[in-house]
Amino acid sequence: MKILVAVKRVIDYNVQIRVKEDETGVHTDNVKMSTNPPDDNAVEEAVKLKESGKAKEVVAITVGEEKAQETIRKALAVGVDRGIHIKTEGYIEPLGVAKILKKIVEKEKPDLVFMGKQAIDDDCNQTGQMLAAILGWAQGTFASKIELKDKAIQVTREVDEGLETLEINLPAIVTCDLRLNEPRYASLPNIMKAKKKPIEQLVAKDLGIDIANRIQQTKVEEPPKRKGGVKVASVAELVSKLKNEAKVI
Amino acid sequence: MSVLLIAEHDNSNLKVLTLNAINAASKIDSDIHVLVAGNKCESVSKEVAAVPLVKKVLQSESANYENYLAENLTPLVVKLAEKYTHIIASANTFGKNFMPRVAALLDTSQVSDIIKINSTDTFIRPIYAGNAFATVKSSDKKKCITIRPTSFDPAPTSGGEARIEKIEATDTPNISKFIKKEETKSERPELGTARVVISGGRGMQSGDNFKLINAIADKLNAAVGASRAAVDAGYISNDHQVGQTGKVVVPDLYIAVGISGAIQHLAGMKESKVIVAINKDGEAPIFSIADYGLEADLFEALPKFLEELNKLNTIQK
């Protein structure tokens, strides 16, 4: 079995983002970047399947600018075999990314594609589902548990009401929730070893597919600021204010 | 222009978030048709038909639609989409699951999780977990949109008499099957939709101390949340996590207890209508966004809080 894992480079989840003064986006210069958190879970799950002998090869793929390779190096350092970097300039919408991934899936022929359920920058939550649709594959989204069966995979999904379990045929797409596993840290020797693992680089515009964006971001602004609140002196005052002033209890 | 809205239900009752989506859709166009796809779901169609904002109900029944498998629902929506300019669903796990499939097959770039409608093609949506709002303009001929339910009020539910039209089910690919659903058995409301949320942070010092929070949650009919720090410390399971990498909540009342207010946590709750912070560190960043801040030791404040609540004659549920 072969697994393809898609990873994305995003602003680190601990960074307070700053909206640009001209309202065209957010500042990314000199900002700490890292792998999208649930993509780390996707990598971890694929590596675990390899360690247990169920998967033979795990390939990590990223779509993005030159520095996006960092996310692949990180995946290689925790046990992924090789990487593919699709170089792009600027932001590509999930539909475009899904089309790029489809092209690579057709070439690599994985049995499973893993990725995070959502990227924490654009918060779209689309790429996995879109890729599944255009490949005609089944999908298991928001996965918090998976179990491989013969020619199928059981996916337990985090849904609003609780947990839902589906059995989907292979090949399939699984988008991973944070609860799926605990991503490991890379050891220094493995980080060094990862430097020798191959990363193939392709340029998106050479793939011959239409990845033009359809959505124009006309403005990015700060959310309305909350007014500075008041400090209350006692619990009794707090409860009284909640009851009589805010009227929420 | 016309809107196709996909209803969420359990084959007997309509899920309320669909009403919020219907209200949002009405700000795009008044010609709203609602698809009720399911198995023996006639009662749901009737419920939808009674919503005054709905012009027509499209009812399609098949055992293959019973559990909303995205693979089975998508071909039906894609076929119906031919006649509509906007295809809409709620941005909960229901809409998030199938809508991108529909969008991709229509070769449309989906607009996810919108909180405001500026015009028929321009919307506002939060990015970076609500730390920025993006105004986006879609150039696609057909628009696939998911609506953040908490940003729109629910549509009124009675007085309407929309026509119910039966639609034939389409072929389904049979590549996925439903095994089971385990609904979280909690006496408390769901974190994502609760009117009141009370969350504990590292200041709780142990999982056992969450009983102080639980007691208040029971009293207020609140959901219990937690900061990532509390989850990482093992005080509480991670399905309670509120924040950028956890759940984003927008309750009427959010009570943060022993939470300092890390960016990652604020991203998940700062849109709440009223925020209360209880923390012994008066300099904690959480106070800068709290409507009511109480600088106090939570181990003294929480029992006192419960005591004060017990004194009230009525508490909103």
Image: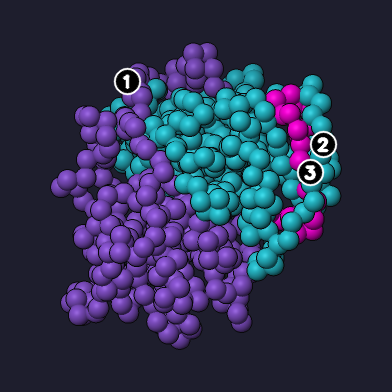
Chain colours: A purple, B cyan
- Amino acid on which the number 3 mark rests in the picture: Gln
Residues marked 2 and 3, same chain: yes
Residue B66 falls within the magenta-colored stretch: yes
Q: Which residue is mark 1?
A: A228
Q: The C terminus of chain A is located in which quarter?
A: top right
Residue B197 is at least partly visible in this image: no
Mark 2, other Cα within 10 Å: few <14 / some 14–19 / many ≥20? many
Q: Is residue B117 visible?
A: yes
Residue at the far front: name it: A208
User: Mark 2 falls within which chain?
Assistant: B
- Amino acid type at mark 2: Ile
Q: Residue at x 30, y 60 (%)?
A: A205
Work out whether residue A247 or residue A214 is closer to the camera in this orientation and state it.
A214
Frontmost of labels 3 and 1 is 3
Between the residue at mark 2 and the residue at mark 3, the CA separation in whole angstroms equals 7 Å
User: What is the x, y in percent for residue A84?
Assistant: 31, 71
Badge 1 amino acid:
Gly
Q: Which residue is mark 3?
A: B59
SS under mark 2: strand
> Above or below — where is A206 with respect to B38?
below
Q: Position of residue B67 (x, y in %)?
A: 71, 56
For the record, the magenta segment spans: B48-69
Q: Nearer the viewer, residue A181 or A149?
A: A149
Residue depicted at 26% across the width and 70% down the height: A201
Q: State whether residue B218 is above or below residue B182.
A: above
Label ID, residue B1: none
Q: Can you identify the residue that label 2 sits on? A: B164
Horizontally, is A173 left or right of A60 in the view?
Answer: right
Q: Nearer the viewer, mark 2 or mark 1?
A: 2
Q: Pinpoint the chain carrying mark 3.
A: B
Percent of width and height locating residue B64: 75, 59
